[in-house]
């Protein structure tokens, strides 16, 4: 069924959301939360977001909270995975927030499309630092991945990655310490304002990066020192058309394909040079999901609803599925 304007396409979706919400309100009335309401209290499968929010990126840390950014004004939202309740904790700068990741120090690294990147305190919402990643135009800082020493950002409009080197104890770099790593090798940039580099993660052995090139449906293994890429051999698997967020758990790679309303799952070689297709995850409540984060055996994906015209009244939600 095609999505309807300002509402979810599937009637069952709203029932699931209302059931979870009623359970959460009932628990609140008893002075508890769903997490403590009993061994059989389910966590919601759908987490509602503010109308008109326009989510894209999602991050989850060790605690049961999801962090999401708005493509509209860049505000950041924190949702309790146990109850589905949440709030905007950082008012946006008026420009988009795209991909984001949470580090162990409670800091959110946020890709800001044409505005570079910023780092936000996940508790207070305070902006800790802002970075202009490039002076070239056009630019589209799309996603981010964290290693112990570097925050890596993709650019959908430029054949490059940007590295923010982290200092001792995770110290943030100065504004002019951004390192540009041009992409070469197998990388063939589609010119113009076409989505190229998008989701990013690391190979299982930690030696290289993996970047999906959305416009051509290819997965690249990137040498982080040189930017030279090779195509990951995925055998007879279909192209990763509209490949968006990447999530790796051990040697399992989840590739979100937004307009396909699907997640393709692969078993990677340790060095990330090849992978075997395992299965495809779909769900009736997917409505152009963009990215994924995991918590306790579940994947959480924001519905970006790119095929639905955004208005201040358009409804958005996060969908939870089994990993």
Image (spheres, helix red, strand yellow):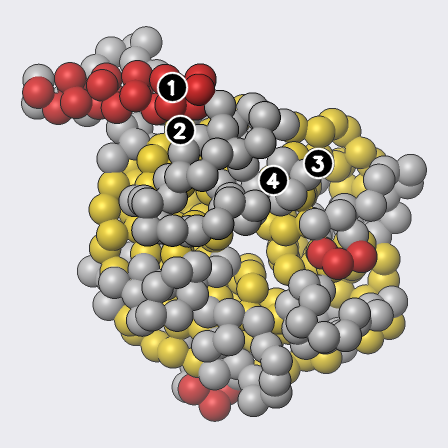
Residue pointed to by mark 2: 46
The 10 Å Cα crowd at callout 1, few under 14, some 14 to 19, many 20 or more, is: some
What's the CA distance linking mark 2 and mark 1?
Answer: 7 Å
Q: Nearer the viewer, residue 50 or 220?
A: 50
Residue 253 location, x and y as percent? 68, 41
Residue found at x 51% / y 70%: 113
Residue pointed to by mark 3: 264
First in sequence: mark 4 or mark 3? Answer: 4
Q: Nearer the viewer, mark 4 or mark 1?
A: 1
Q: Nearer the viewer, residue 139 or 199?
A: 139
Relative to 22, is 248 above or below?
A: below
Residue 233 location, x and y as percent? 88, 48
Relative to 230, is 256 above or below?
A: above
Q: Which mark is residue 249?
A: 4
What's the CA distance linking mark 4 and mark 1?
Answer: 28 Å
What's the CA distance linking mark 4 and mark 2?
Answer: 23 Å
Residue pointed to by mark 1: 16
The 10 Å Cα crowd at callout 3, few under 14, some 14 to 19, many 20 or more, is: many
First in sequence: mark 3 or mark 1? Answer: 1
SS at mark 3 in the image: strand
First in sequence: mark 4 or mark 1? Answer: 1
Residue found at x 71% / y 29%: 280
First in sequence: mark 2 or mark 1? Answer: 1
Relative to 124, is 164 above or below?
A: below
Relative to 217, is 314 above or below?
A: above
Mark 2–mark 1 CB contact (< 8 Å) = yes
Residue found at x 16% / y 19%: 27
Inspect this view and state whether residue 181 appears. Answer: yes
Residue 6 location, x and y as percent? 40, 39
The 10 Å Cα crowd at callout 2, few under 14, some 14 to 19, many 20 or more, is: many
Mark 3–mark 1 CB contact (< 8 Å) = no
């Amino acid at each position: 069924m095609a999505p309807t304007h300002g509402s979810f396409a599937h009637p069952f979706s709203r029932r699931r959301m209302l059931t979870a919400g009623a359970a959460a309100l009932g628990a609140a009335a008893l002075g508890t939360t769903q997490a403590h309401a009993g061994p059989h209290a389910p966590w919601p499968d759908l987490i509602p977001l503010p109308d008109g929010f326009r989510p894209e990126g999602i991050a989850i840390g060790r605690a049961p909270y999801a962090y999401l950014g708005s493509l509209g004004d860049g505000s950041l939202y924190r949702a309790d995975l146990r109850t589905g309740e949440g709030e905007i904790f950082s008012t946006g700068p008026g420009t988009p927030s795209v991909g984001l990741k949470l580090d162990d120090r409670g800091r959110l690294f946020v890709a800001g499309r044409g505005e570079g990147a910023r780092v936000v305190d996940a508790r207070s919402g305070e902006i800790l630092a802002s970075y202009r990643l490039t002076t070239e135009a056009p630019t589209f800082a799309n996603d981010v991945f964290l290693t112990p020493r570097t925050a890596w950002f993709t650019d959908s409009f430029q054949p490059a990655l940007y590295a923010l080197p982290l200092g001792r104890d995770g110290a943030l770099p100065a504004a002019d310490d951004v390192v540009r790593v041009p992409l070469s090798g197998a990388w063939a940039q589609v010119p113009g304002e076409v989505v190229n580099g998008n989701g990013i993660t690391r190979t299982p052995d930690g030696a290289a990066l993996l970047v999906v090139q959305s416009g051509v449906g290819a997965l690249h293994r990137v040498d982080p020192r040189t930017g030279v890429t090779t195509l990951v051999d995925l055998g007879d698997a279909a192209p990763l058309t509209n490949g968006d967020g990447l999530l790796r758990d051990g040697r399992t790679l989840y590739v979100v394909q937004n307009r396909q309303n699907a997640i393709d799952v692969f078993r990677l070689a340790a060095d990330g040079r090849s992978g075997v297709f395992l299965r495809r995850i779909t769900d009736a409540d997917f409505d152009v999901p963009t990215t994924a984060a995991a918590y306790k055996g579940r994947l959480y994906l924001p519905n970006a609803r790119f095929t639905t015209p955004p208005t201040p009244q358009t409804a958005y939600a996060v969908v939870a599925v089994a990993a």
